[in-house]
């Protein structure tokens, strides 16, 4: 059965070219040209992935993403010309799975689409997912792998699905540092060539804002210089 992708893009030429290329790859495509139309389609129809522009008429991409996430975990990739880190953090914080900046390479975009659909459909199984369900305690943090929840001092921490996947993977492998490239492969399902390593940095920054007392002096989500990131055993 063909995988369905919704393109939400107000520039019609870009949307039509993108749709043409995706159809050649065997996807079933629908297009919305403003935020309100995109939200309506996303909430009323079934899609395997959504490609979402940020600067849209009627309702911007951040708002659309946030509204979708209230009821759906469909993979969302932002397509945007905005490269500022604060925009990337905001985009991921609203629940997007990734972002691709314009102009993008066709092969890179296709790779990310395939990876996100595979992960969403359960085709990618990482070391983390083979672990028995339970609660992993790291200092004041509790990572509940059965209920997909994270708590600190007993209080729930609101995380996106991708943030949860990230911290749960590191919790299962507590104390072990992973490079950005390894994390892209394990969490996003991207190969090293087509993954944007800055996606990892943005994700780390966002998670630290939620779990650390002082983000300038993290106690949990640590950086190992020259290697990557790890969750401290404490």
Image (cartoon, rainbow, N blue to C red):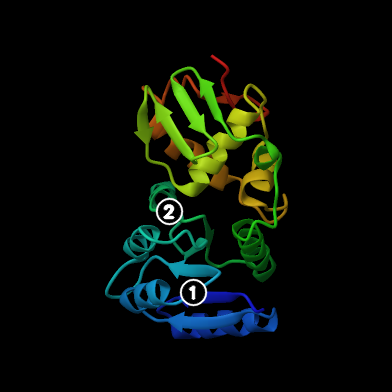
For the point 66% across and 65% down, which residue is it? 114
Q: Residues within 10 Å of mark 1 (few under 14, many from 20)?
A: some
For the point 63% across and 30% down, which residue is it? 172
Q: Quadrant of the N terminus?
A: bottom right
CA distance separating discs 1 and 2: 18 Å
Q: Nearer the viewer, residue 233 or 145?
A: 145
Question: Where does the image place residue 181, in percent across and percent down from the top left?
Answer: 68, 42
Q: Which residue is mark 1?
A: 46
| Secondary structure state at the residue bearing disc 2 | loop
Q: Nearer the viewer, mark 1 or mark 2?
A: 1
Is 119 displayed left or right of 93 in the figure? right
Image: 176 above or below 13: above
Q: Using the rendered view, name the quadrant where residue 117 is placed.
A: bottom right
Question: Where does the image place residue 131, in percent across and percent down from the top left?
Answer: 67, 35
Is 148 displayed left or right of 182 in the figure? left
Visible residue check, residue 77 = yes
Q: Which residue is mark 2?
A: 95
Question: Where does the image place residue 168, in percent across and percent down from the top left?
Answer: 56, 35
Q: Residues within 10 Å of mark 2 (few under 14, many from 20)?
A: many
Visible residue check, residue 229 = no
Question: Where does the image place residue 202, in percent across and percent down from the top left?
Answer: 49, 43
| Secondary structure state at the residue bearing disc 1 | loop
Is 66 displayed left or right of 143 in the figure? left
Q: Using the rendered view, name the quadrant where residue 178 is placed.
A: top right
């Amino acid at each position: 059965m063909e995988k369905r992708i919704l393109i939400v893009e107000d520039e019609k030429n870009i949307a039509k070219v993108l749709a043409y290329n995706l159809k050649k790859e065997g996807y079933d495509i629908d297009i919305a040209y403003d935020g309100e139309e995109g939200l309506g389609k996303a909430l009323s129809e079934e899609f395997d992935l959504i490609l979402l522009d940020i600067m849209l008429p009627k309702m911007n991409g951040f708002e659309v993403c946030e509204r979708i996430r209230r009821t759906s975990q469909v993979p969302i990739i932002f397509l945007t010309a905005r490269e500022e880190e604060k925009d990337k953090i905001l985009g991921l914080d609203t629940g997007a799975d990734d972002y691709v900046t314009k102009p993008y390479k066709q092969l890179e975009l296709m790779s990310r689409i395939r990876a996100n659909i595979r992960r969403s459909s359960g085709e990618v199984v990482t070391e983390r997912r083979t672990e028995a369900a339970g609660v992993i305690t790291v200092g004041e943090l509790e990572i509940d792998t059965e209920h997909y929840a994270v708590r600190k001092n007993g209080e729930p921490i609101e995380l996106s699905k991708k943030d949860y996947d990230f911290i749960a993977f590191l919790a299962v492998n507590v104390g072990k540092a992973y490079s950005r490239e390894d994390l892209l492969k394990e969490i996003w399902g991207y190969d090293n060539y087509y993954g944007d390593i800055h996606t990892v940095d943005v994700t780390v920054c966002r998670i630290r804002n939620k779990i650390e007392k002082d983000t300038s002096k993290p106690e949990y989500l640590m950086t190992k210089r020259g290697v990557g990131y790890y969750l401290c055993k404490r």
